[in-house]
Image (cartoon, rainbow, N blue to C red):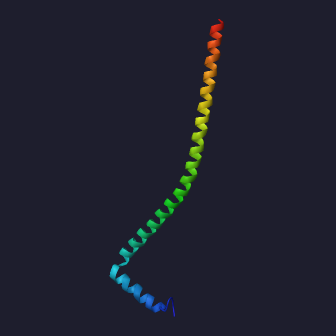
Amino acid sequence: MGIGGISIWQLLIILAIVIMIFGTKKLKSLGADLGSAVKGFRQSVTDKSEDKGADESAQAATEDIVQHSESDKTQAKKQTKAKEKEKEKV
């Protein structure tokens, strides 16, 4: 007895019939197509998990840039006010 009541000989007969109907080239291309589909699915799943991490780091970087630009703006305002005060003194 084999898998689920099907013996090895019955599986070999089924395999032989499938090969005769479709041919080895068709089965080979079918296997390659199936393999590439599985590979593409795996890549898309891992890309999405990496994208989440990349999105979080990009968002943190954007927040840092915004904070630095705001501090640069306040610093620039302070410098211009200091220059105006120096001009008033002169």
Residue 87: percent from the left, percent from the top? 62, 9
Residue occupying image coordinates x 60% and y 44%: 60
Disc count in the image? 0
Query: Image quadrant for the C terminus?
Result: top right
Q: Is residue 67 left or right of residue 22?
A: right
The part of the image, by quadrant, that contains residue 66 is top right
Residue 10: percent from the left, percent from the top? 44, 91
As rendered, which of 74 and 24 lies closer to the eye? Answer: 74
Residue occupying image coordinates x 39% and y 75%: 27
Residue 77: percent from the left, percent from the top? 61, 22
- Residue extending farthest to the left is 21
Above or below, 84 relative to 71: above
Residue occupying image coordinates x 44% and y 88%: 12
Q: Is residue 58 left or right of residue 31?
A: right
The part of the image, by quadrant, that contains residue 17 is bottom left
- Residue extending farthest to the bottom is 1
As rendered, which of 24 and 40 lies closer to the eye? Answer: 40
As rendered, which of 53 and 86 lies closer to the eye? Answer: 86
Above or below, 32 relative to 53: below
- Residue extending farthest to the top is 90
Above or below, 6 relative to 46: below
Residue 1: percent from the left, percent from the top? 51, 94
Residue occupying image coordinates x 64% and y 12%: 85
